[in-house]
């Protein structure tokens, strides 16, 4: 057995609740389906993994969207955070993330 999982299966769900025109709550949870042999292998090597859970808030301020997220996952990519989340919300293992988005559009010049 090796600790690299090339065939990890999971089921994920996300939700978005719009509170006002400019404020939204978002959430995401991924349940990782690990065979017992893999779970036993990790346990025998003192490695514990948890299902990723994240909640956040999005605030729109006209031209910008601010995202503040809390998650027990440290990674951003699916192949990292789904199989390898090693912290739990119960043990204060949460992370804070922050993003700012801005949409730019190129305006066409008016003909004179």
Image: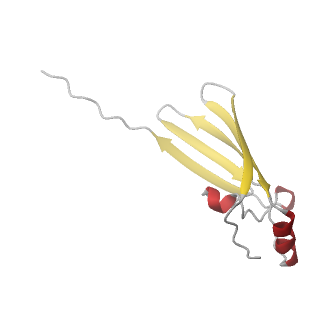
The residue at the point 70 percent across, 57 percent down is: 82
**Direction from residue 77 to residue 109 in the image, left or right:** left
Q: Residue furthest left?
A: 112
Q: Quadrant of the N terminus?
A: bottom right
In the rendered image, residue 99, in percent from the top left (x then y), is placed at 56, 49
In the rendered image, residue 51, in percent from the top left (x then y), is placed at 78, 55
Q: Nearer the viewer, residue 39 or 109?
A: 39
> Residue 75, can we see it?
no
Compared with residue 105, is residue 52 higher up or lower down, i.e. above or below?
below
In the rendered image, residue 31, in percent from the top left (x then y), is placed at 78, 51
Color theme of the render? secondary structure
The residue at the point 84 percent across, 67 percent down is: 39
The residue at the point 83 percent across, 74 percent down is: 41
Q: Residue furthest top?
A: 112
The residue at the point 46 percent across, 34 percent down is: 63
Residue 58: image quadrant is top right
Residue 52: image quadrant is bottom right
Compared with residue 13, is residue 3 higher up or lower down, i.e. above or below?
below
> Residue 6, can we see it?
yes
In the rendered image, residue 90, in percent from the top left (x then y), is placed at 87, 57
**Direction from residue 68 to residue 10 in the image, left or right:** right
């Amino acid at each position: 057995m090796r600790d690299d999982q090339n065939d990890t299966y999971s089921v994920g769900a996300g939700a978005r609740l719009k509170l006002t025109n400019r404020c939204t709550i978002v959430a995401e949870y991924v349940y990782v389906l690990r065979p017992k042999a893999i779970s036993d292998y990790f346990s025998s090597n003192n490695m514990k993994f948890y299902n990723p859970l994240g909640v956040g808030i999005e605030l729109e301020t006209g031209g910008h969207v601010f995202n503040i997220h809390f998650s027990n996952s440290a990674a951003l990519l699916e192949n990292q955070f789904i199989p390898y989340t090693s912290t739990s919300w119960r043990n204060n293992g949460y992370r804070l993330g922050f993003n700012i988005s801005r949409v730019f559009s190129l305006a066409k010049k008016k003909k004179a």
